[in-house]
Amino acid sequence: MQANIGKLCTADYHSFMNASKNAISQNEKQQLDQEGYVILRDFITPERLEVLRHSIEALYAEQGERAGSEYRQEPQTRRLANLVNCGELFEQVVAEPKVLSFVQQVLGDEFKLSSLNFRSANPYSNWVQPLHCDVGAVPDDKGFWVCNVIWLLDDFTADNGTTRFVPGTHRTGKLPQEVLSDPAAPHPDEKIVLETAGTVVVMNAHMWHGATANRTAHHRRALHSFYCRADKPQQQYQKQLLSPEVQERLSPALRKLLALDDPLNDELSSKLSGASGFLK
């Protein structure tokens, strides 16, 4: 599938949001609403996939020990954060129109980017993320407010640190640590992502999920574009992190998506950004 990666960068934000409401099928909407996830196979073209992989590895080599320092480090894992600041390639990822249609289905019309990170499970690692809801979020009286999108840069297999999730748990209104004696243990109803590189997985991030151990000799790489409702703080405060040069050249639609001119976001995110859901 060749995605129209530039659409949001030139279109009026509200016009795009109105047009996107019919961009996904009824079956996809039902799957996302009831199960909490949708899998988009072959979404990233091979050419785009190679550029993303190359760019990520170059950034990781360039940043060295500073890699991921804008956020929190995780055991046995490579991280990069603040990726919108690293070039138009990553701006296109967060503004992908088809993906935003699914995010809109979860969060409603008023949402923003919360963070764009890279995560790679190290070879031969035994670190298992506990089941969690992103930023420790449970739905409130307005509904769902977090949505995570996983861009698979490598195949996700049963042995290489794939993501596990428990379908339907986004509708429980509970955090896994409130219910489970050991959120890191296997769950009887969990499923795992077994998909090829180039797949994109959209998840209602209130659904319990976590990464598994990588028992192979190779890194398992993915991008995570994470969105939240407009009345919640960003996980990574974009206005504070993005360089003045990047902010200056962004289109009005991207500025809206990143909440760069939103006083409410400034108030919320300057005080409350940084939550992860499982890292303390």
Image (spheres, grey):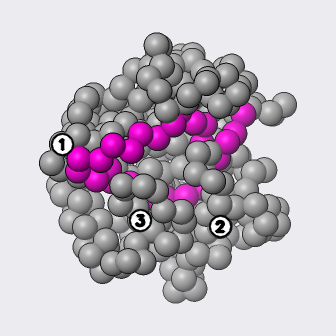
The secondary structure type at the circle numbered 3 is: strand
Q: Where is residue 221 in the image (x, y as percent from the top left)?
A: 29, 51
Mark 2, Cα crowd under 10 Å, few <14 / some 14-19 / many 20+, is many
| Quadrant, the N terminus | top left
The secondary structure type at the circle numbered 2 is: loop
Image point 69% across, 39% down: which residue?
137
Q: Mark 3 points at which residue?
A: 80
Viewer can see residue 197:
no
Q: Mark 1 points at which residue?
A: 216
N-terminal label among 2 and 1 = 1
Q: How far apart are marks 2 and 1 (CA)?
A: 35 Å
State whether residue 149 is above or below residue 181: below
Q: Name the residue under label 2.
A: 237
State whether residue 91 is above or below residue 122: below
Q: How far apart are marks 2 and 3 (CA)?
A: 15 Å
Residue range in magenta is 112-138
